[in-house]
Amino acid sequence: MSQLDIKDSEVDIVIGALHSDLTSFMNEWRPIFTRYHLIIVKDPELKEDLEIPDGFDLDVYSQQDIDRIVGTSNSIKFSGYSCRYFGYLVSRKKYIISVDDDCVPAKDDKGLLIDIVAQHLLNLSTPATPFFFNTLYDPFRKGADFVRGYPFSLRTGVACSLSCGLWLNLADYDAPTQALKPSLRNTRIVDAVLTIPAGAMLPVSGINVAFDREVVGPALCPALRLAGEGKFRWETMEDIWCGLCIKVTCDHLKLGVKSGLPYVWRNERGNAIESLKKEWEGVKLMEEVVPFFQTLRLPEAAVTAEACLLEIVKAVREQLGRSNPMYARAAEAMVEWVEIWKKAGSGSLPGNN
């Protein structure tokens, strides 16, 4: 399959709205987004009405819709950045592209807008090569191929199920790094896409990602929440945990994950110094979370993303749950998420047709 084989009707763009006035954001994206259906999920903690310009094919969901469709939950919270996951849940499309409302289209070296939808779909529709690293990055890209010594038995690759884009301006640094280097900015576009090798973990950001919802959608869930979680990127870890879950799932199911193009431009938001105390808890957690996921092996009987997630839950409870109640709560959220996802797939969620 090539990107040209993916119909516009197979794509949903999910936007988590943490700002009430989306006028400028939507107008910036107008040249790219008007071809596709949009799902905008309003942060339940946002009190003001959303301001959205005309000219888009979209559905907007609020706290009332979340309560109506999912109900109240003690385990899953769709507030803050986690509101985007509700969009993943209610979508009925094969492919989802997720963009946060503090990002606008970036421009390439020629000053042209980067079409993130086209690039993400290209990443997802061309094979990934997780089992042997190609030193020329993506061998399926125009002008590239497999390098000398690459086994021919592996050159067909595997399906790519997750595409992780990057950011210009304010890159995905943690609060300690940004606090120590307040003027540090990413201004360089690296014109490359690579497959993350099997067994290698990576911190996935939910800001600029795309995935095959039908294959790995259930593995993307809002589970881990910090005790003192805030409202800014530096103060949350849900997408990092989610990324580790989906990478283990993709490795087990022999699916690919790509990183690199496309880029978005991320605007300034938050204060790294003020966020440092809230994120420090998550910084410490990663020192035990990453080794856990690096050594995690799932049973062969797990052949779906839902089954993989439930196996991860078992391991979390056995190996991490006793050390910190945060992990036990994450496990509960993951179990509930699988149940909700199955209901959504069967059409049994109320008001979700």
Image (cartoon, rainbow, N blue to C red):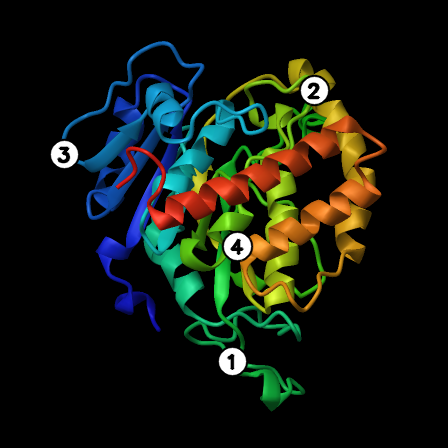
**Relative image position of residue 240 (x, y in whole percent):** 63, 40
> In the displayed structure, would residue 16 be above or below residue 245?
above
Residue of label 3: 55
Q: In the rendered image, is residue 191 in sight?
A: no
- Tell me the mark number nearer the camera, choosing from 1 and 3: 3
The outermost residue toward the front is 348
Q: Amino acid at mark 2?
A: Ala
Which sits earlier in the primary sequence, circle 4 or circle 1?
Answer: 1
Q: Nearer the viewer, mark 4 or mark 3?
A: 3
- Which residue is at a point 77% across and 41% down the rendered structure image? 317
Pointer 2 residue: 227
* First in sequence: mark 1 vs mark 3: 3
* Residue 52 percent coordinates (x, y): 23, 24
Q: Which residue is mark 4?
A: 190
Q: Which residue is mark 1?
A: 145
Residue farthest toward the bottom in the current orientation of the protein: 152
How far is disc 1 from disc 3 in space, using C-alphas? 41 Å
